[in-house]
Amino acid sequence: MKTNVLNSLPRIFIIGMLFFITPNSCLAGAWTRKSGETYLQFTLNTYCADAHFDEDGNRRDFSSDGHFTDVNANTYMEYGLSDRLTVLTSLSYKYLQYEDEAIETKTYGFPDIDLGTKYKLSDTKMGIFSIQGMVKIPETYDEDDTLPLGNGQYDLEVRLLYGISLYPKIPGYVNLEAGYRWRLDTPSDECRYLAEFGLDFSPRIYGRLKIDGILSMENSDRSSDNGNTPNVKNESDLGKLDLAIGYKLPAGYAIELGVRPEIYGKNTSAGTNVSLAIAFKR
C-alpha cells in the first residue's frame, strides 16, 4: 500500500524536505535591476538524499535503505520596474520519487510559486542595502498526496540584503543577507541567513561560494508532530554549501554548473543538489 511510505519516511518529513530544497533563486543578492531590464534563468536541478539529520544534528541513514529524489526544472525571472524597485518570481516543475525496500512512490507537477519585490534602500561607496519581501503560494498541487509537492501553506518573508563590489582590488563581490519567514500554519517560523562571495577568474569565467542557512524559531505546534517518529519535528535547522562556476556567453547569456550539499542541520534531509543553468539578461 502507498501509505507504507509514511512508516519509513513520515509525511511531515517529506514535506519538510521539499520546503528546504525548493530552489532559492529568489535570493539573488542586494543588487536591483535597472529600469526595464529583464533577467531570466532556467535551471535543471537533481537532488538526492539517502540520509537525514536527527534532532541532535547527527547524520543518519533513512530506514529500510530509503532514497529520495527530486528532479525539477526551475524558471526564475527579475524585472526592473525602476532602478530601485525589482519584481521577481520563481516557478518550478518537479518529479519526486521515494523508494525503499518495501515501496516506491512518485509524484510530479507544479510546487509552490514564489513572488517577491526587492527595493534598493541606499547605494554608496560602502555598498548597497536593499530590502526584499516574498510570498510563497501553495495553490498548484494537492497537499494530501502521499508524496506531496509542498506543505500546502502560505509563507511570508522579509529580508535585509547588503552587497559590496570589491573592484578594483579584487574582481569580485560580497553579499550578506538576513531575514525572517512567517509560516502561516503548523511549522515553526524561521530566521534565514546567507553569506556569499563571488569572483571573476577571467573576463568570461566566474565562480561563487555561499553558505545558506535556516534557523528554526521553535514556535511550531508540537502537538502535530508525528508520534511514531520522535526525531522528526516541525522545527528544523539546515545549512547548505553552494558552489558554482559559470561561463559568460555572448549577447548577455551565461551558463552555470552548481553543486549544493547540505552540510549541517536538525530534523531534515541530508542530501546534495546538482544544477545546470542558463541565464539571460537584457
Image: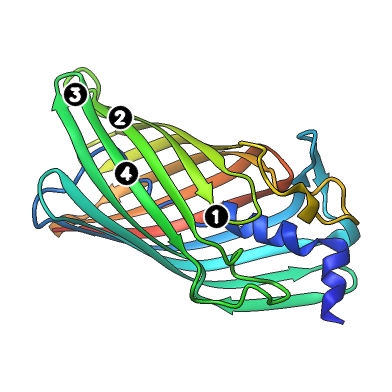
Label 3 vs 4, first from the N-terminus: 4
Q: Amino acid at mark 3?
A: Tyr
Proximity of marks 3 and 4: CB atoms separated by less than 8 Å: no
Q: Earlier in the sequence, mark 1 or mark 4?
A: 4
* Placement of 4 over or under 198, stated as above or below: below
Q: Which mark is residue 184?
A: 1
Question: Between disc 2 and disc 1, whose residue precedes?
Answer: 2
Of the pair 123 and 133, the residue shown nearer to us? 133
Element carrying mark 3:
loop
**Cα separation between marks 2 and 1:** 27 Å
Q: Which residue matches tag 3?
A: 167
- Identified at 89% across, 69% down, the residue is 101
Q: Amino acid at mark 2?
A: Tyr
Query: Looking at the image, is mark 3 or mark 1 earlier in the sequence?
Result: 3
Position of residue 123 relative to residue 16, above or below, is above
The spot of residue 208 in percent (x, y) is: 39, 37
Q: Which residue is mark 4?
A: 132
Query: Residue 19 at x, y = what percent?
Result: 58, 56
For the residues carrying marks 2 and 1, which lies nearer the camera in this image? 1
Residue toward you, 262 or 16 = 16
Residue occupying image coordinates x 38% and y 52%: 134
What distance separates the C-alpha of mark 3 from that of mark 4? Answer: 25 Å
